[in-house]
Image (spheres, helix red, strand yellow):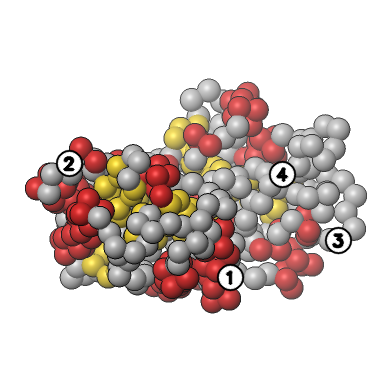
Amino acid sequence: MVSDYGRTKVRYDWEHRKQYLDMPFEMKEYERRVDGLRRAMAGQELDYLLVYGNPAWGGPVRYLSNFDSLMGNSIVVLPLEGEITLVTDSVMHSEPMHSCIWMTWIRDVRPGHHPGTVRTAENIADFVADALREKNLLSSAGGLVSARQLPFELMGRLVELLPEGSLVPADGVFESVLAIKSEVELEVLRKSARYASIGLDTVFEKLALGVSEMELRAEAVYAMAKAGADMGTFALTSGPRAGLKHGEPTERRIEEGDMLFIDLCAPHRGYMSDVARSGVLGKASQQQKEMLETALEMRDSVVQAVRPGARICDLQQIAEGIAQRRGLADYYYPTGFGHGIGTSVAESPILFPDNEAQLEENMVFSLEPMIVIEGVGTAVFEDMILVTSGGAEVLSDATTDTW
């Protein structure tokens, strides 16, 4: 069933919209994901999953449905058996077909008005309850993915509609499947990493005395877009602000001896990248040189130790040990060691300190052990790392000749 919530000028039923369907992968890849999630659900005795997404946290919904929540809330209702449902209020001017509904392979799509576009918008929690009721699952055991991202109104309505205790957090169930990338996912991630590398290389090619941070961003964004990247994010700080790490580029002009920090995400077909470089314009001071050499040694040493079975905490200790040996331990950030990457910019594997979990083949993460000194700058060489059967493959290839 397709919900009919208002007057639309363009049909959005499956038979009409399937002609516009545009997905990064063949359908068998999405079937693989659904099958994997259903096996994981069965192992936790869950009868359904609710997978939530929004513009700031769209990865889980994109991973499962290929739908991009551009401006509202979306929930995929995934039963242990039977048809999958997508509900969303990510709809512009009451036209689902103007709002990327044609991106998804899910046939049962139930759109609601986006809050702010009508006097009283539907709460899509009611659509979720309708779908569960039709599937005879309203009183069954369910799992909620991305519970921390749900807005108060949506979460409150779900609590009202579902039996107490029937819905439990299920991020672990979802991440157990998402963390291991398929070959087709890796192909897209390689492209995303390449686009970010192009952007970083462009910054250092165009870096010169008097050029502004904004001019460097313009050059890099153009190069990435020309290569094939989607719209991404861009952080660039220089001079004293480089010691504050992330920040939007400004009109500040680069001066001799400035440290720079650049961090890029250049998405491709729904998959993120996260690659960063630090450097200096002109001759680096002894302090800057020591910071950059330490950051590069940390990255290289950790990459050499990556392999299936390696414990995350042991890799963390390699980086921290190098910082200690070089006298920079006070400026090393254990919580900035890295993060998994895929349809979200931070996902499994989770690289927090003291995590004894082991890496597995075909996991992908951004590795960024860093030295940051306020008022001086940031030293980091962040790269995307694939865990291979025999070690690691560095997916990004941006220059390290930055000082």
Between disc 4 and disc 1, the foreground one is 1
Residue at numbered disc 3: 10
Q: Can residue 197 be seen?
A: no
How many angstroms separate mark 2 from mark 1 (CA)?
38 Å
Give the class, few, some or many, for how many residues have Cα within 10 Å of label 4's Cα (few <14, many ≥20).
many
Q: Nearer the viewer, residue 299 or 243?
A: 243
Is the residue marked by circle 1 packed among few (<14), some (14-19), or many (20+) residues within 10 Å?
few
Tag of residue 329:
2
| Secondary element type, mark 2 | helix
Q: Which mark, residue 89? A: 4
For the residues bearing labels 3 and 2, Cβ distance under 8 angstroms: no
Disc 1 to disc 3, how far (Cα)?
Answer: 34 Å
**Do labels 2 and 1 touch, CB within 8 Å?**
no
Say which label, 1 or 3, has the lower sequence index.
3
Marks 1 and 3 close (CB-CB < 8 Å): no
* Left or right, residue 247 beside residue 330: right
